[in-house]
Amino acid sequence: MRILVLDDQEIIRVQLKRILQKSGYAVTEASDARTALEILDREPMDLVLSDIRMPGMTGLELMKTIAARVPDIAVVMVS
């Protein structure tokens, strides 16, 4: 399973990535919504873990964009 972890705070991304990788998941990180969308355009993901409150596009706005572009992906909001 491939998971995209999205959070503007590096420490949170690193912690989530470490936990998920120890459980055997392939993890990719993004620090903002624009980067997350670029990653989703070129790499298949099974799950997105996204912060809700981020500068620029919020996690909720991103979730709507992802649903329109990649309707079969699961998105979990983390705050």
Image (tube, rainbow, N blue to C red):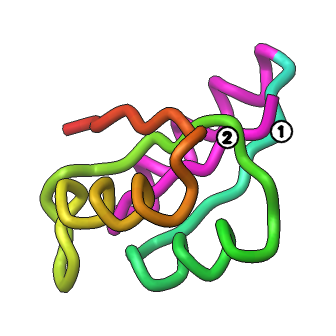
User: Which labelled disc corresponds to residue 15?
Assistant: none
Q: Residue at x 38, y 59 (%)?
A: 7
**Is residue 51 rendered to the left or right of residue 45?**
left
Q: Quadrant of residue 54?
A: bottom left
- Name the residue tied to disc 1: 26
- Name the residue tied to disc 2: 3
**Is residue 49 rendered to the left or right of residue 38?**
left
Q: Residue at x 28, y 37 (%)?
A: 77
Image quarter hosting the C terminus: top left
Q: Residue at x 31, y 54 (%)?
A: 63
Residues drawn in magenta: 1-23
Looking at marks 1 and 2 on the same chain, the residue that comes earlier in the sequence is marked by 2
Q: Residue at x 78, y 39 (%)?
A: 2
Q: Is residue 73 magenta?
A: no
Q: Quadrant of residue 49?
A: top left
Mark 1 neighbour density, 10 Å: few (under 14) some (14–19) many (20 or more):
some
Instruction: Give the percent coordinates (x, y) of residue 40.
Output: 65, 66
- Mark 1, secondary structure of its residue: strand
Q: Report the front residue among 18 and 4.
A: 4
Mark 2 neighbour density, 10 Å: few (under 14) some (14–19) many (20 or more):
many
Q: Label 2 sits on what residue type?
A: Ile
